[in-house]
Image (tube, coloured by chain):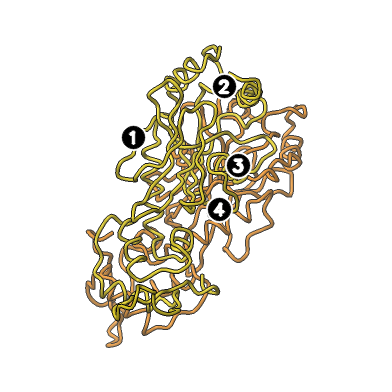
Chain colours: A yellow, B orange
Amino acid sequence: MQKSEEIVAEEALDGSRFMPGLSVDCVIFGYHERELKILVSKFKNTSYYSLPGGFIKRNEDADEAAHRVLFERTGLRDIYLNQFYTFGNTHRANPEPMKSVMLANGIEFNGNHWMLQRFISIGYYALVNYTRAEPKPDFFSESCLWYDIDDVPKLMQDHLLIVKKALETLRNNVNRKFIGVNLLQDQFTMGDIQKLHETILGEKLNRTGFHRKMLNSGLLKRIGKKKTGGSHRAPYLYVFHSDEE
Amino acid sequence: MQKSEEIVAEEALDGSRFMPGLSVDCVIFGYHERELKILVSKFKNTSYYSLPGGFIKRNEDADEAAHRVLFERTGLRDIYLNQFYTFGNTHRANPEPMKSVMLANGIEFNGNHWMLQRFISIGYYALVNYTRAEPKPDFFSESCLWYDIDDVPKLMQDHLLIVKKALETLRNNVNRKFIGVNLLQDQFTMGDIQKLHETILGEKLNRTGFHRKMLNSGLLKRIGKKKTGGSHRAPYLYVFHSDEE
């Protein structure tokens, strides 16, 4: 371990800096080539995969903690990030995964270590521009990578439940403007937005019905045809109206 | 203070029994005579009003804690109760209101007392049958009473924000079956359910449009006319279909 990493590790392990028993976990969604992906970290020298997460500093808002985690893992600021559920079941109090992580990192601890106590975790989901994010692992992790939502490795603790609940929230909001604004390019065809909805919902949608609904929603503005090299069947391009919610 | 109350107070003040820095706050909605009401407690010998709330025991799920608070304040079990948002801002760390409450109750404390630390609170909202609830204060409070949602006394800390966020959640869900099932009588007229929606939304709705929407929703089943003593203009009675979500 290098010197700078040691300092980071020491700070990260100093329980007095954080709200006890509380964490944030982030489901970071990206959309690329018609696949919905999330970021997953793998702990060094273990078989544990987890959502990017962290603790809440004593002088930090919970939302700030989530933004900090998101920035540290993706290099992105000013991202769409929303709290969606707080996971407070007692079955989260299983210390075994964190024991393995600490052992794998050569960290000395006893059974009362604050990181082995019961944690209640505030779940956030983020929508990021896949092409702009630069995922990087923290010093506990050997990787932090995008995984297709249908091909996520086995996650530790209740992190799969956290992903499911985040996806449920995304599905409930699929018609809201912020989903498309954050996951599509600035200009898109009706086919692009239909595919985004289908990917989020995990089901095919009727083309005619979907187009009618989108056009009636008042969210979209047609800005011309896509340049496709002269075909008369070139699709229209759309942007979101800037003033609609 | 009587003996039994002393034991209760001692237990309630024993920080080792609870998750540190965490609380639940409940916005308990009831509907009566076309008014939407919430339960508000007033702390003994202070001017502080608050939402019913409490702490999470170390061996208790967060949801269980909220159900326990709800039962203690209303005598009701098996109530519709849902987590809606977790309040985690640092400005919640103001110890002054709790200091006043502890002084007013003759509780000895120093500045490091666990109840004076920063708390993050998980917000729950409940929908209860107003006529079945029997509100009762805890031993810190001199009253626990229903207040019309438009006439709530000045609440301590950020409890007004918690109420607003709960009401926002209720409004976003106004068309969902669970709202009517939990706030209306078993049988109701179209006028009853329109009035409920208007009260929650805080605005008048077009009668024809509302009736059409409700009939098209597939949620309602017509079961006959209301007995009103022979008038031929007696309104129809409805119940919710038992199999629809």
Instruction: Tell me the number on the disc at residue A153.
Output: 1
At label 4, the amino acid type is Ile
At label 2, the amino acid type is Trp
Rounded to the nearest whole Å, what is the CA distance between mark 3 and mark 1? 25 Å
Q: Check disc 2: other Cα within 10 Å, few if <14, some if 14-19, many if 20+.
A: some
At label 3, the amino acid type is Arg
Count up the numbered dots: 4
Q: Mark 4 or 1 closer to N-term?
A: 4
Does A11 sit above or below residue B118? above
For mark 2, name the chain: A
The residue that mark 4 highlights is A79
The residue that mark 2 highlights is A114
Q: Check disc 4: other Cα within 10 Å, few if <14, some if 14-19, many if 20+.
A: some
Q: Left of B111 or right of it: where is B65?
A: left
Query: In what element is the residue under mark 4?
Result: loop
Query: In what element is the residue under mark 1?
Result: loop
Q: In which quarter of the image is the N terminus of chain A?
A: top right
The residue that mark 3 highlights is A68
- Seen from the viewer's position, the closer of residues B61 and B39 is B61
Q: What residue is at 45 percent from the left and 69 percent from the top?
A: A187
